[in-house]
Image (cartoon, rainbow, N blue to C red):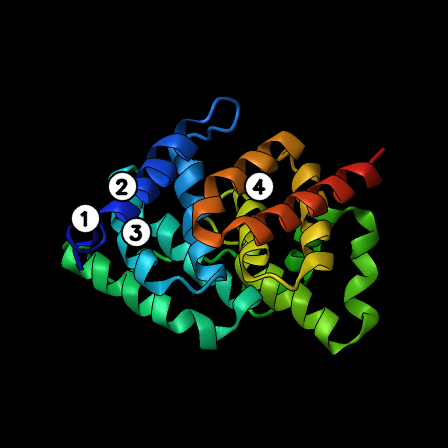
Amino acid sequence: MNYRETDPEFSQRFEHFAFQEVVHEEGQQLDEETRHLAILATLLGCQGIEEFREELPRALDAGITPVMAKEVVYQAVDYLGIGRVRPFLDAANDILTARGISLPLEGQATTTMEDRLEKGVQAQAEIFGAGMKEAWKGGHINRWLAENCFGDYYTRTGLSLAQREMITFCFLAAQGGCEPQLTAHAGGNMNLGNDRDFLVRVVSQCLPYIGYPRSLNAIACIDRAAEARK
Protein backbone atom coordinates (compact mmCIF):
# COMPACT_ATOMS: atom_id res chain seq x y z
CA MET A 1 0.00 0.00 0.00
CA ASN A 2 1.37 3.39 -1.01
CA TYR A 3 0.23 5.64 1.82
CA ARG A 4 1.70 8.68 0.13
CA GLU A 5 -1.08 8.25 -2.44
CA THR A 6 -3.95 6.97 -0.26
CA ASP A 7 -3.19 8.98 2.91
CA PRO A 8 -0.92 11.83 1.87
CA GLU A 9 -1.41 14.12 4.87
CA PHE A 10 -0.90 11.32 7.39
CA SER A 11 2.08 9.97 5.48
CA GLN A 12 3.74 13.37 5.33
CA ARG A 13 3.43 14.00 9.06
CA PHE A 14 4.34 10.47 10.17
CA GLU A 15 7.38 10.19 7.92
CA HIS A 16 8.63 13.61 8.97
CA PHE A 17 8.23 12.75 12.64
CA ALA A 18 9.58 9.16 12.60
CA PHE A 19 12.36 9.49 10.04
CA GLN A 20 13.47 13.09 10.46
CA GLU A 21 12.39 14.78 13.68
CA VAL A 22 12.94 11.82 16.02
CA VAL A 23 16.11 10.57 14.34
CA HIS A 24 17.79 13.98 14.44
CA GLU A 25 16.46 15.35 17.74
CA GLU A 26 19.35 17.07 19.50
CA GLY A 27 20.53 15.05 22.49
CA GLN A 28 18.38 12.03 21.62
CA GLN A 29 20.36 10.52 18.76
CA LEU A 30 21.80 7.01 18.59
CA ASP A 31 24.34 5.48 16.26
CA GLU A 32 22.69 3.68 13.36
CA GLU A 33 23.51 0.17 14.58
CA THR A 34 22.02 0.75 18.02
CA ARG A 35 18.97 2.57 16.67
CA HIS A 36 18.05 -0.21 14.26
CA LEU A 37 18.65 -2.96 16.83
CA ALA A 38 16.34 -1.13 19.22
CA ILE A 39 13.65 -0.64 16.59
CA LEU A 40 13.74 -4.29 15.49
CA ALA A 41 13.38 -5.41 19.12
CA THR A 42 10.62 -2.89 19.73
CA LEU A 43 8.63 -4.10 16.73
CA LEU A 44 8.86 -7.66 18.03
CA GLY A 45 7.70 -6.47 21.43
CA CYS A 46 4.65 -4.61 20.09
CA GLN A 47 3.88 -7.28 17.48
CA GLY A 48 4.39 -4.90 14.58
CA ILE A 49 4.96 -7.61 11.99
CA GLU A 50 4.14 -5.51 8.93
CA GLU A 51 6.38 -2.68 10.09
CA PHE A 52 9.09 -5.26 10.89
CA ARG A 53 8.98 -6.31 7.24
CA GLU A 54 9.60 -2.66 6.32
CA GLU A 55 12.27 -2.07 8.96
CA LEU A 56 14.48 -5.14 8.54
CA PRO A 57 15.60 -4.19 5.00
CA ARG A 58 16.36 -0.66 6.24
CA ALA A 59 18.36 -2.13 9.12
CA LEU A 60 20.34 -4.42 6.84
CA ASP A 61 21.06 -1.53 4.48
CA ALA A 62 22.29 0.51 7.47
CA GLY A 63 24.82 -2.16 8.50
CA ILE A 64 22.96 -4.58 10.74
CA THR A 65 24.32 -8.00 9.83
CA PRO A 66 22.06 -10.99 9.18
CA VAL A 67 23.49 -12.62 12.32
CA MET A 68 22.63 -9.59 14.45
CA ALA A 69 19.10 -9.47 13.08
CA LYS A 70 18.56 -13.18 13.70
CA GLU A 71 19.91 -12.89 17.26
CA VAL A 72 17.30 -10.23 18.04
CA VAL A 73 14.56 -12.57 16.84
CA TYR A 74 15.94 -15.60 18.69
CA GLN A 75 16.28 -13.78 22.01
CA ALA A 76 12.73 -12.44 21.73
CA VAL A 77 11.34 -15.94 22.27
CA ASP A 78 12.24 -15.84 25.97
CA TYR A 79 10.41 -12.54 26.51
CA LEU A 80 7.48 -12.92 24.11
CA GLY A 81 7.09 -16.67 23.58
CA ILE A 82 7.28 -18.57 20.33
CA GLY A 83 3.58 -17.96 19.71
CA ARG A 84 4.32 -14.29 19.12
CA VAL A 85 7.79 -14.63 17.59
CA ARG A 86 7.28 -17.27 14.89
CA PRO A 87 5.81 -14.79 12.33
CA PHE A 88 8.90 -12.60 12.77
CA LEU A 89 11.27 -15.54 12.29
CA ASP A 90 9.43 -16.42 9.09
CA ALA A 91 9.60 -12.79 7.94
CA ALA A 92 13.33 -12.57 8.67
CA ASN A 93 13.97 -15.80 6.77
CA ASP A 94 11.92 -14.57 3.81
CA ILE A 95 13.77 -11.24 3.66
CA LEU A 96 17.24 -12.74 4.06
CA THR A 97 16.56 -15.44 1.48
CA ALA A 98 15.25 -12.86 -0.98
CA ARG A 99 18.55 -11.02 -0.59
CA GLY A 100 20.48 -14.14 -1.56
CA ILE A 101 21.69 -14.90 1.96
CA SER A 102 22.09 -18.63 2.51
CA LEU A 103 20.42 -20.15 5.57
CA PRO A 104 21.19 -21.37 8.13
CA LEU A 105 23.65 -18.68 9.19
CA GLU A 106 26.85 -19.56 11.01
CA GLY A 107 26.15 -20.91 14.50
CA GLN A 108 26.62 -18.56 17.46
CA ALA A 109 26.12 -20.92 20.42
CA THR A 110 28.87 -21.01 23.07
CA THR A 111 27.27 -23.37 25.59
CA THR A 112 26.44 -27.06 25.66
CA MET A 113 23.50 -28.80 27.26
CA GLU A 114 25.86 -29.70 30.09
CA ASP A 115 27.20 -26.21 30.94
CA ARG A 116 24.30 -23.93 29.95
CA LEU A 117 23.11 -23.55 33.55
CA GLU A 118 26.54 -22.66 34.87
CA LYS A 119 27.21 -20.13 32.12
CA GLY A 120 23.69 -18.75 32.32
CA VAL A 121 24.14 -18.06 36.01
CA GLN A 122 27.43 -16.33 35.22
CA ALA A 123 25.68 -14.08 32.72
CA GLN A 124 22.94 -13.24 35.23
CA ALA A 125 25.52 -12.35 37.85
CA GLU A 126 27.43 -10.15 35.41
CA ILE A 127 24.28 -8.20 34.61
CA PHE A 128 22.49 -8.09 37.97
CA GLY A 129 25.21 -8.74 40.54
CA ALA A 130 26.62 -11.60 42.57
CA GLY A 131 23.32 -12.09 44.39
CA MET A 132 21.98 -13.82 41.28
CA LYS A 133 24.36 -16.76 41.69
CA GLU A 134 21.87 -18.56 43.92
CA ALA A 135 18.63 -17.32 42.32
CA TRP A 136 18.30 -20.35 40.05
CA LYS A 137 17.69 -22.51 43.13
CA GLY A 138 14.40 -20.73 43.83
CA GLY A 139 12.29 -23.12 41.76
CA HIS A 140 12.14 -24.73 38.35
CA ILE A 141 11.15 -21.54 36.53
CA ASN A 142 14.10 -19.71 38.08
CA ARG A 143 16.31 -22.58 36.91
CA TRP A 144 14.81 -22.42 33.41
CA LEU A 145 15.42 -18.66 33.39
CA ALA A 146 19.10 -19.22 34.16
CA GLU A 147 19.76 -22.14 31.82
CA ASN A 148 17.39 -21.34 28.95
CA CYS A 149 17.01 -17.55 28.80
CA PHE A 150 20.53 -16.68 29.87
CA GLY A 151 22.41 -19.91 29.19
CA ASP A 152 20.96 -20.58 25.76
CA TYR A 153 20.65 -17.00 24.45
CA TYR A 154 22.61 -14.38 26.39
CA THR A 155 25.77 -16.44 25.99
CA ARG A 156 25.56 -16.49 22.19
CA THR A 157 27.92 -14.47 20.04
CA GLY A 158 26.65 -12.03 17.41
CA LEU A 159 25.63 -9.38 19.94
CA SER A 160 27.47 -8.07 22.98
CA LEU A 161 26.02 -8.58 26.46
CA ALA A 162 25.19 -4.86 26.64
CA GLN A 163 23.37 -5.06 23.30
CA ARG A 164 21.42 -8.08 24.49
CA GLU A 165 20.34 -6.32 27.64
CA MET A 166 19.32 -3.28 25.58
CA ILE A 167 17.10 -5.30 23.24
CA THR A 168 15.53 -7.03 26.26
CA PHE A 169 14.65 -3.59 27.60
CA CYS A 170 12.98 -2.88 24.24
CA PHE A 171 11.02 -6.17 24.22
CA LEU A 172 9.62 -5.35 27.66
CA ALA A 173 8.92 -1.67 27.06
CA ALA A 174 7.11 -2.37 23.80
CA GLN A 175 4.80 -5.13 25.03
CA GLY A 176 3.68 -3.23 28.13
CA GLY A 177 2.42 -4.71 31.38
CA CYS A 178 5.95 -5.75 32.39
CA GLU A 179 6.91 -2.72 34.44
CA PRO A 180 8.57 -4.65 37.33
CA GLN A 181 10.73 -6.57 34.84
CA LEU A 182 11.33 -3.42 32.82
CA THR A 183 12.60 -1.59 35.90
CA ALA A 184 14.87 -4.53 36.77
CA HIS A 185 16.29 -4.65 33.25
CA ALA A 186 16.76 -0.89 33.20
CA GLY A 187 18.98 -1.46 36.24
CA GLY A 188 20.73 -4.34 34.47
CA ASN A 189 21.43 -2.07 31.52
CA MET A 190 22.92 0.54 33.80
CA ASN A 191 25.16 -2.10 35.38
CA LEU A 192 26.56 -2.79 31.90
CA GLY A 193 27.15 0.86 31.06
CA ASN A 194 23.84 1.60 29.31
CA ASP A 195 23.12 4.60 31.53
CA ARG A 196 19.93 6.59 32.05
CA ASP A 197 20.70 9.01 29.22
CA PHE A 198 21.30 6.13 26.81
CA LEU A 199 18.07 4.35 27.75
CA VAL A 200 16.03 7.54 27.36
CA ARG A 201 17.52 7.95 23.89
CA VAL A 202 16.53 4.35 23.10
CA VAL A 203 12.96 5.05 24.17
CA SER A 204 12.90 8.29 22.18
CA GLN A 205 14.01 6.57 18.98
CA CYS A 206 11.40 3.84 19.44
CA LEU A 207 8.48 6.13 20.35
CA PRO A 208 7.01 6.29 16.82
CA TYR A 209 6.63 2.50 16.88
CA ILE A 210 4.99 2.06 20.31
CA GLY A 211 3.33 5.42 21.01
CA TYR A 212 3.43 7.80 23.94
CA PRO A 213 1.85 5.80 26.81
CA ARG A 214 4.34 2.91 26.72
CA SER A 215 7.22 5.30 26.08
CA LEU A 216 6.33 7.41 29.11
CA ASN A 217 5.90 4.25 31.21
CA ALA A 218 9.36 3.11 30.10
CA ILE A 219 10.95 6.41 31.11
CA ALA A 220 9.27 6.16 34.52
CA CYS A 221 10.81 2.69 34.93
CA ILE A 222 14.22 4.06 33.92
CA ASP A 223 13.89 6.76 36.56
CA ARG A 224 12.93 4.22 39.23
CA ALA A 225 15.97 2.12 38.37
CA ALA A 226 18.24 5.16 38.44
CA GLU A 227 16.85 6.30 41.78
CA ALA A 228 17.45 2.85 43.27
CA ARG A 229 21.13 3.13 42.41
CA LYS A 230 21.67 6.30 44.48
Q: Amino acid at mark 4?
A: Ala
- Residue labelled with disc 3: 56
Sequence-wise, which precedes: disc 3 or disc 1? 1
Where 137 sits versus 65, above or below? below
Closer-to-camera residue (55/160): 55
Please identify, in this view, whether the residue under mark 4 or under mark 1 is nearer the observer: 1
Query: x and y percent of residue 94 in the render?
Result: 22, 64
Q: Amino acid at mark 3?
A: Leu
Furthest residue in direction top, as rendered: 26
Q: CA distance from mark 2 to mark 4?
A: 35 Å
Q: Looking at the rendered structure, which numbered label has been put on residue 4?
A: 1
> Helix, strand or loop at disc 4?
helix
Q: CA distance from mark 4 to mark 1?
A: 38 Å
Query: x and y percent of residue 155 in the render?
Result: 55, 53
Question: At 53% from the left edge and 68% from the top edge, which residue is drawn?
Answer: 80
> Helix, strand or loop at disc 1?
helix
Please identify, in this view, whether the residue under mark 2 or under mark 4 is nearer the observer: 2
Question: At 39% from the left edge and 31% from the top edge, which residue is drawn?
Answer: 21
